[in-house]
Image (tube, rainbow, N blue to C red):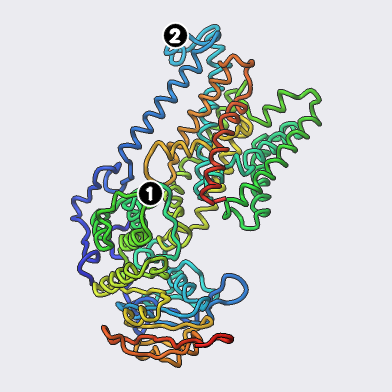
Amino acid sequence: MSTDLRKAAPAPADSPRPPRGYLRVGNRIALPVQRSSVVVVLCALAALLVAAVLTLTLGRLGIRLTDLPSAVFGGAEGKDAFVLNRLRGPRLVTGIATGAAFGLSGTLFQTVTRNPLGSPDIIGLSTGAGAGAAAFALLLPGVPVWIGAVLGAVGAMALVYVSTGTGFRNPGRLVVAGIGVAAISTAVIQYVVYVVERDAATSLTAYLNGSLAARSWSDATTIWVVLLATAPLCALVSRHLAVGEMGDEISASLGSDPGRTRTAAVVLSIVLAAGAVTVAGPIAFVALIAPQVARRITRGAGPRLLLSALTGALLLVLADLAAQQLPLFDDLPVGIYTMAVGGLYLGYLLTREWRRGSL
Amino acid sequence: MEKGKPVTIDAGTHTGGAPAVQGLSAREVTLSYGAAPVVKGVSLEVPHGGLTVIVGPNGCGKSTLLKSFARVLKPVSGHIALHGRDVRALRGRDFARQVALLPQSPIAPEGITVQGLVRRGRHPHHTLLRQWSPDDDRAIALALERAGMTELAEAQAGDLSGGQRQRAWIAMVLAQDTEVILLDEPTTFLDISHQYDLLELCAELNRDGRTIVAVLHDLNQAARFASHLVVMNHGEVVAEGAPHDVLTAELVAEVFQLDCDIVPDPRTATPMVIPHERVRAGKTG
């Protein structure tokens, strides 16, 4: 046929070797891995490790740094055992996975809606899950809380989907509908908590803002199971999300199915957010910020699922470190810290999107 | 997974007896976005190896028909075939290795470079675990070169001018390395010199053996570059054939409600539309 591309003959069979920038395993596997991303991911992991060490060692009850390795790997005794196994260990492990789940959930939804404001915490997904969790935990004890969180999340998203009139397409309507649904969900949480517990300030803030205080190993297990079960599916959908960014027509003509990609991403996002809310409550803005930070510290396009997860974990662990160590109040719920920081970022984002005319 | 295996479907092996139609064809295709059909029972054979241009007034269904050829829009009835085989029976990826579409308003992802954008065109040649194929680098380099974007490969897509951006998208479509390329109003938003650059590029690609189908607005450009001209009106094909057979003053009057003379283009001798002055009520001369 033609003289150029058509004749771009396949390379000799013995040397189909990807160039630099690919992770290659045998002849069957070749995945794009940029050196800069590897560096960034390693830095994020290192930062997470530092934050984890600080979480375990700081403060009056902190494990001494020199005792930490033997406590973690050998088995702790006395006060250290209590801090590691009861007080801070489960809280830290839960926090890492919860932050990662929020980060993933955020990046999936933001990519599908092609807008940073199409984030679970802005459009009422997290709050809806929180309302469901509160209702099930307080009104239907005995039924697993996660069922309530999933139902709440699905209900909130169905309400948003219907009330925009255009599904998840128009970011402006999505945000407005989401704010409405989030307000309804907040009202549900307040109602449920006050019906059940008259003197419910602590319980209320936990369900409204999210908290990592007094988490158990079973919470840690729950969220890690959700995270590890959804991770391979996220990896599967990632490649299609990347072409989906260019619009439905291009992605269909590249052989991807945009409708199926969107559905898969929204379902995964709901499951991840519901899982995170089940163990920690609707902690605000981690899902909003983590993908944006990930996007800014690496160049190029496409959803960065791994980095968004790590950034989410780091953000939440740092916020919880602040919640535990800042001498403002004794153990304020971590959600209040993320709310304070995230609120500023949301303001910036709204102004920017407004100027760009995408709202 | 089945790398190296030719994906082109052999013509003639699936329809017993009669030889299959080469390339894309539509049979009795009806298309709609809602209740009212936009394209009504159109049958059309796209000449394989030709440069087909579809023209027609706004809302005549030309872009819609193009989308159905690209397998993006599913016909309400009838079917689209590639080499005689219903495109719905093909896997998305296999079809995407043979037919590419450049839609009217593709979205450049935030932060993407031209090279990154062009690399996305290789998507149908990749699998989940093997997101690289031996032809990638060569196809991408050639696509950038053909579109004249080699120098700008590292530039941010968001920083490009309209003409450059359109060429970047063309490069993406070229990297897809398909035998058929569908272009939906590719000259919109381009100034006149970039319009002709783009049309010349289409003609060049066509000479190199690719089948091109483009939806255009400008009748003179269509007549100049098309080897096969298709005129649509009210969701139907009203005329098709060589431009000098198809483009007549009567047809333009009927389809576009425009009185005109048809004269030969002084440079290419293709038919050229010279509209008459329109006399409006209340105005003189």
Tell me residue A56's x, y (percent): 50, 16
**Residue position marked by numbered label 2 in the rendering:** A67
Chain ID at mark 1:
B
What is the quadrant of the N terminus of chain A in the image?
Answer: bottom left
- Residue drawn 54% across the image and 27% down it: A95
How many numbered markers are drawn?
2
In the displayed structure, A200 sits above or below B54; it is above
Q: Identify the secondary structure beneath mark 1.
A: loop
**Residue position marked by numbered label 1 in the rendering:** B112
Left or right: A218, with A38 as reference point:
right
Amino acid on which disc 2 is placed = Asp
Looking at this view, is A105 or A25 the one in front? Answer: A105
In the displayed structure, A236 sits above or below B66; it is above
- Residue drawn 25% across the image and 43% down it: A20
Residue found at the far bottom of this picture: B250
Q: Is residue B21 visible?
A: no
Q: Picture quarter containing residue B249? A: bottom left
Chain ID at mark 2:
A
Label 1 and label 2: CA atoms lie apart by 47 Å
Amino acid on which disc 1 is placed = Ile
Q: Identify the secondary structure beneath mark 2.
A: helix
Looking at this view, is A304 or B93 the one in front? Answer: A304
Q: Is residue B66 visible?
A: yes
The residue carrying pointer 2 sits among few (fewer than 14), some (14 to 19) or many (20 or more) residues within 10 Å by Cα, namely few
Q: Picture quarter containing residue B10? A: bottom left
Tell me residue A323's x, y (percent): 58, 20
- Residue drawn 52% across the image and 80% down it: B235
In the displayed structure, B24 sits above or below A10; it is below
